[in-house]
Amino acid sequence: MKTEIVKKYLRLDKMPTVWCPGCGHGIIMGSLLRALELRGRSKNDIALVSGIGCSSRTPGYVDVHTLHTTHGRAIAFATGIKMMKPDMSVIVVMGDGDCAAIGGNHFIHAARRNMDITAVVYNNGIYGMTGGQVSPTTPYDAFATTAPYGQMEPPFDIVELALGAGATYVARSSVHNVPKLDELIVKGIKNNGFSVIDVITPCPIAYGRRNKLTADPMKNMQWVKEVTVPRKKAEEMSEEELRGKWITGVFRDVEHVGLVNLYIELEEKLKRAKENKGEEA
């Protein structure tokens, strides 16, 4: 990362981060910082919101308007910010559990309302900070503290959830393909609606050690490469070949009027009606 971007967007007095060696969260944060720079907005026009978890430490390191909220409630707080400050770029960073488990209801309704918020999901398939429990995206047969004999439940697909709930920009990348990740986050921030970027990233300790990846960063990165498949390549693969894989790319990119704009239009309509009523009196 360019030194000037680091100095501009990071709170250097908060370094080093709490993330473990080999964790992909720092890579995602780097992509987010580059996306903010490419977007070209003033830091005073950006709000970064998180809940609880490893990923949710991100706002503590980024020098924009930041808010560290309660577990699963980041989107609810972000919704309030966007409604009161519609001109701000509001970004939410969440882990897979924060997003799809305790925060799942907020996630689907923000997508349904098409809130102009960008949700970046640090998807490592585990509850890393709180003890290595199974999360909604833990792969089938993977081991966790709450699945000592292997995960028996099918994992949640955050992309499919976002598509079904109505998000207008839905994409997935990984920490193995950083240039593409930068590009997808930029597009998500530019989208005038609810944007979801699902990012496949390794957890070297809580997930890696239990699933024979050890804490070796290179083995973890190789695992990410092996479990992700670009959409174009996936179209040529069989259902059996795709089992256990995460398909990457852009799944939806459309324009649709969101709730914030509808409220602004309603406010202007009521204001005109009040002015007209005053003129008639």
Image (cartoon, helix red, strand yellow):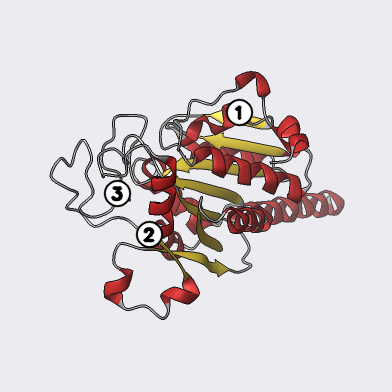
- Vertical placement of residue 115 versus 4, above or below: below
Q: CA distance from mark 2 to mark 1?
A: 29 Å
Report the disc number at residue 254.
none
Q: Amino acid at mark 2?
A: Val
* Circle 3 or circle 2, nearest the eye: 2
Verify CB contact (< 8 Å) between mark 3 and mark 2: no
**How many other residues sit within 10 Å of disc 3, few (<14), some (14-19) or many (≥20)?**
many
Name which quarter of the figure residue 261 lies in: bottom right
Locate residue 218, reporting x and y percent: 44, 45
Name which quarter of the figure residue 16 lies in: top right
Q: Quadrant of the N terminus?
A: top right
Q: Which residue is identified by label 3?
A: 138
- Vertical placement of residue 252 versus 258, above or below: below
Residue occupying the point 41% across, 45% down = 202
Residue occupying the point 61% across, 37% down = 48
Locate residue 104, reporting x and y percent: 38, 47
Q: Which residue is identified by label 1?
A: 61
* Residue closest to the eye, 8 or 168: 8
Q: Which residue is identified by label 2?
A: 227
In this view, the residue farthest toward the bottom is 236
Locate residue 136, reporting x and y percent: 30, 48
Verify CB contact (< 8 Å) between mark 2 and mark 1: no
